[in-house]
């Protein structure tokens, strides 16, 4: 025991303990210092950075797409609507394994290859972080239910309720109203910062028709909301919200009932009908057949459906009303006759011998009249219009010359775009000396003028241009710009006069009288449609060659393929004594101009009868208003009963 106590050194042990304690304390102090330094770095030095990162994980700024403006016809019929739809979307930043997620989704709701292909393309497009990318539109209720049950497996996958464009009248308005479609890479690449902001949260853009022309007004302005989310990206609450501004609503001059009548009248034939309000240039109807269902394009058309439309020989995607360019044929004869009167090359008594052809001095070529033996010995202007005498107009065109013809026709909208508020309009061709020298590198020949005098040769017009020409005739030289839209929200779109020509009143009467006789005389080329109407039509028929006929040969319909036969045309306005509506009709390969005239008759009947009903209703209301005393008692008038008598 004594030896043990002698060996134990209490002082040494105390010194060692003290040293160890000091080391431990120093270590603890150092660790605390490091912890405090780290805490200072997090809470003071880098506070804003880490708060921003935290908020980015917890709080998101989400765009709120605006409601696209609606489109109505003149009677309040809805032409472009927004319908609720459920869309499957994926937020890439919240998905741990995208390919595995797609496999799970494919098991739940089977995808087509083209849907996945389009989804991967959208992922590559420019977008904001945490912006949802659509995968499947118009989910069914069973699909929504399966996704809801498996929500725990699908981080970053959302089912969003959104409004999708819908066109209730389908193919009836495809070429006028147009459609919206997915924003593609080319369109997205052309966006500036302001456009990119406006389209955030929006997946569609106007592609054709009014939807494209009035895109800025229909789109509206995007809103935003700050939302708090959980770790799975689900929204817990909305912290702040700026509401979007809805797009403007459009009200059209367009009459959907008249459009239906014109569409049904064309039937299975290829062609176009354009009807204009003579007083303001409003487009009452604009039909192009065949047509297509624009709803197919809204959320992305399938490759199969698009191929069928694009490869069809009947070109259903082609808007014949503003893009189809056709020789106008004899439909321009009233305008050229008016030019002859205006420039004093003819008068009412000027006559031409018609043996069935016209021959330029010094030339062997015979310019044939459509009537092989001619129309008679001495043909005057009225008969030339009524019976569509080609020989008379060969002579007139030669004597007037191309300079006068081109100048006068330009005032009627020929050779230039009409300015109608639908994109992709074509301007046709109204040839001149300069045009031929510039395009063909050749001088103008007298025979060229003869061809122009019959609306053939190099002359090309669209149905819209023919309607404008006819409306300008009805307006006695005042050319109105055609306009589909009458109001943007409550603001009216003012009619626009774009050109005019001053012609003596007597000349207008001669042309109108001749055009009326085209329909209402026994020798008129459109006399077959005159029966049973209580109003007068002023019109002009026309046919346009599709293939040339050699000298000395006759037109043989049966020897030609259907698509090589003549086009049938008709232009007219009514009522003849007080014009309200101008119509242009073309039936591709329709041969007989009467086929086009019959279609126009149906359009006139539908419109004027509707106007008569409206006028009658207004008259009854006015009569009632004038028959009511201030105290509400009915005033006694001749042929009426008071309230007491009844």
Image (cartoon, rainbow, N blue to C red):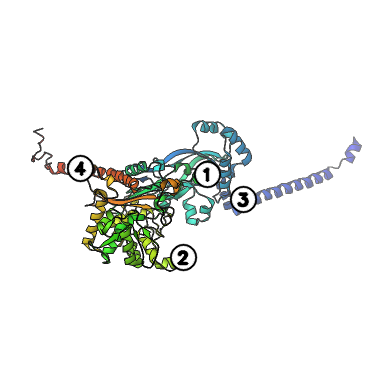
On screen, residue 33 versus residue 220, left or right, reads right
- Disc sitting over residue 42 in the figure: 3
- Disc sitting over residue 307 in the figure: 1
Q: Secondary structure at mark 1?
A: helix
Instruction: Give me the C-alpha separation between circle 3 and circle 2.
Output: 78 Å
The residue identified by callout 4 is 616
Of residues 264 and 511, the one nearer the viewer is 511
Instruction: Give me the C-alpha separation between circle 3 and circle 1.
Output: 60 Å
Mark sitting earlier along the chain (4/2): 2
Q: Are marks 4 and 2 in contact (CB under 8 Å)?
A: no
User: Residue 202 placed where, x, y %?
Assistant: 48, 47
- Disc sitting over residue 582 in the figure: none
Instruction: Give me the C-alpha separation between circle 4 and circle 2.
Output: 57 Å
The structure residue drawn at horizontal position 56% and vertical position 34%, both measured from the top left corner, is: 109
Mark sitting earlier along the chain (4/1): 1
Q: Are marks 1 and 2 in contact (CB under 8 Å)?
A: no
């Amino acid at each position: 025991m004594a030896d043990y106590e002698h060996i134990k050194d209490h002082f040494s042990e105390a010194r060692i303990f003290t040293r160890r304690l000091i080391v431990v304390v120093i270590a603890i102090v150092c660790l605390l210092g490091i912890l405090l330094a780290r805490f200072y770095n997090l809470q003071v030095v880098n506070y804003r950075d880490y708060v921003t990162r935290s908020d980015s994980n917890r709080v998101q700024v989400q765009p709120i797409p605006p409601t696209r403006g609606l489109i109505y016809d003149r009677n309040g019929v809805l032409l472009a609507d927004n319908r609720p739809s459920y869309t499957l979307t994926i937020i890439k930043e919240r998905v741990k394994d995208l390919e595995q997620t797609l496999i799970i989704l494919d098991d739940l709701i089977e995808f087509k290859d083209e849907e996945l292909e389009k989804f991967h393309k959208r992922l590559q497009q420019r977008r904001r972080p945490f912006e949802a990318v659509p995968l499947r539109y118009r989910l069914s209720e069973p699909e929504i239910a399966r996704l809801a049950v498996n929500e725990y497996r699908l981080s970053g996958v959302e089912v969003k309720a959104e409004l999708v464009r819908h066109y209730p009248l389908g193919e009836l308005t495809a070429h006028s109203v147009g459609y919206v479609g997915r924003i593609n890479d080319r369109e997205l690449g052309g966006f500036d910062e302001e456009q990119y902001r406006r389209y955030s949260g929006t997946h569609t853009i106007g592609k054709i028709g009014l939807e494209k022309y009035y895109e800025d007004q229909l789109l509206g302005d995007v809103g935003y909301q700050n939302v708090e989310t959980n770790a799975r990206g689900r929204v817990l609450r909305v912290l702040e919200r700026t509401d979007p501004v809805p797009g403007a609503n459009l009200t059209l001059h367009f009459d959907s009932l008249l459009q239906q009548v014109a569409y049904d009248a064309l039937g299975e034939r290829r062609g176009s009908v354009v009807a204009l309000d003579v007083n303001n240039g409003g487009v009452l109807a604009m039909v192009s057949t065949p047509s297509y269902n624009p709803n197919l394009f809204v959320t992305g058309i399938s490759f199969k459906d698009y191929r069928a439309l694009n490869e069809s020989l009947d070109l259903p995607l082609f808007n014949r009303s503003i893009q189809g360019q056709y020789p106008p044929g004899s439909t321009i004869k009233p305008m050229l006759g008016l030019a002859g009167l205006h420039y004093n090359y003819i008068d009412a008594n000027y006559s031409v011998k018609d043996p069935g052809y016209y021959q330029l001095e010094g030339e062997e070529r015979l310019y044939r009249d459509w009537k092989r033996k001619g129309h008679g010995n001495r043909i005057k202007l009225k008969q030339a219009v009524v019976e569509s005498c080609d020989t008379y107009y060969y002579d007139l065109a030669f004597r007037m010359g191309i300079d006068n013809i081109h100048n006068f026709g330009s005032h009627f909208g020929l050779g230039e775009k009409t300015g109608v508020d639908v994109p992709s309009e074509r301007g046709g061709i109204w040839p001149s000396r300069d045009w031929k020298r510039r395009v063909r590198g050749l001088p103008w020949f007298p025979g060229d003028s003869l061809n122009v005098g019959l609306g053939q040769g190099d002359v090309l017009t669209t149905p819209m241009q023919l309607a404008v020409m006819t409306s300008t005739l009805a307006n006695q030289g005042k050319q109105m710009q055609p306009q589909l839209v009458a109001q943007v929200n409550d603001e009216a779109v003012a009619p626009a006069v774009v050109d005019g020509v001053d012609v003596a009143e007597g000349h207008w009467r001669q042309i109108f009288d001749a055009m009326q006789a085209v329909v209402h005389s026994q020798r008129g080329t459109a006399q077959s449609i005159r029966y049973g109407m209580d109003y007068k039509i002023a019109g002009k028929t026309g046919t346009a060659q599709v293939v040339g006929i050699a000298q000395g040969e006759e037109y043989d319909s049966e020897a030609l393929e259907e698509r090589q036969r003549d086009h049938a045309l008709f232009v007219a306005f009514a009522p003849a004594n007080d014009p309200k509506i101008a119509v242009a009709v073309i039936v591709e390969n329709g041969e007989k101009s009467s086929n086009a005239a019959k279609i126009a008759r149906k359009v006139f009947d539908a419109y004027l009868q509707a106007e008569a009903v409206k006028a009658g209703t207004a008259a009854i209301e006015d009569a009632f208003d004038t028959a009511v005393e201030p105290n509400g008692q009915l005033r006694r008038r001749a042929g009426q009963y008071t309230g007491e008598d009844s």
